[in-house]
Amino acid sequence: MTNKKGQLITFEGGEGGGKTTQIVRLRDSLTKAGHDVVVLREPGGTVISEQIREVVLSSKNVGIAFTTEVLLFQAARAQIYREIVLPSLKAGKVVLMDRSRDSSVVYQGIVRGFGEKMIEDLNDISTNKTTPDLTLLLDLPVEIGLQRRVESGKMDRLDMEAVDFHHQVRKGYLKIAKENKKKRWHIIDASQSLEKVEEDIWDIVSKKIK
Ligand code: TYD
């Protein structure tokens, strides 16, 4: 474990749940409330991790092996935690992440079938055993999420997986959120309006971060 004093909040969920929009809104509210906030996405967030992102998500790389996929997500994670997340937490900042270790548990551990235990072991290496203080699952029916994604015109390699893949993703998230290890998970109904989702998020976060 790290000797952190900041707070790590992760946003998780399948496609089209509005994580990116909500993270920006939460950043603005927290900043107004006087917090020092850092916003990051995975895979990505550093020069090196963004290069790895390009390799792992490019729709050109359909031939990527699942094992390569597992390790590339972890490689991008190892870099962002060492370069930004761990130093920011140490400095007392609030770190908001658009996906982190739980994406690997669901997408690679559960859906691709590598197993939760193996992925959690890799996550511990990549994050130096850091788990989020709070994880917000933006949950919505697969059809609505994919429709939103198609309308946005931004489909990456994983968005283009079969519909069944996305159903498994949703089921996987709901499973681990309901187990709620360390009581850090909150399930948010992301099919509501942006404003209502923002409100629900603020209710939870403002109680956690004084
Ligand atoms: P991105 O466009 O950043 O996510 P979103 O769908 O939230 O807008 O794409 C990230 C994709 O990578 C997404 O399909 C989930 C997947 N992913 C994994 O499979 N494993 C991981 O560990 C991470 C971080 C992401």
Image: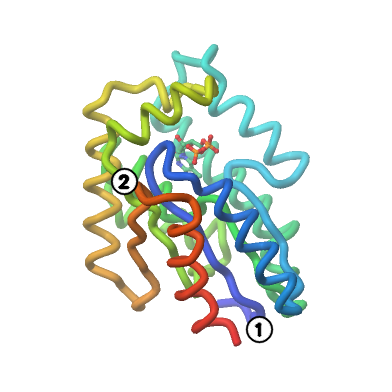
Quadrant where the image shows the N terminus: bottom right
Quadrant where the image shows the C terminus: bottom right
Name the foreground residue: 16 vs 45: 16
Which badge, 1 or 2, is on the more N-terminal residue? 1
Q: Is residue 14 left or right of residue 6?
A: left
Q: Is residue 173 left or right of residue 13?
A: left
The residue labelled by disc 2 is: 140
Query: Percent position (x, y) of residue 148?
Result: 43, 30
Residue appearing at x 23%, y 36% in the figure:
167
Q: Quadrant of residue 44?
A: top right
Reply above or below: 180 against 157.
below
Residue appearing at x 43%, y 62% in the figure:
136
Reply above or below: 151 against 195.
above
Query: Percent position (x, y) of residue 141?
Result: 26, 41
Dot 1 lies on which element? Answer: loop
Alpha-carbon distance for marks 1 and 2? 33 Å
Dot 2 lies on which element? Answer: loop
Q: What residue type is labelled 2?
A: Leu
Residue appearing at x 56%, y 61% in the figure:
127
Name the foreground residue: 82 vs 50: 50
Query: Percent position (x, y) of residue 69?
Result: 46, 32
Residue appearing at x 47%, y 30% in the figure:
68
The residue labelled by disc 1 is: 5
Asked if marks 1 and 2 touch (Cβ < 8 Å), the reply is no
Q: In this view, does 21 lie to the left or right of 168?
A: right
Q: In this view, does 33 lie to the left or right of 22?
A: right
Q: Which amino acid does label 1 sit on?
A: Lys
Reply above or below: 63 against 67.
above
Q: Please tell me whether mark 1 or mark 2 is closer to you in this view.
A: 2
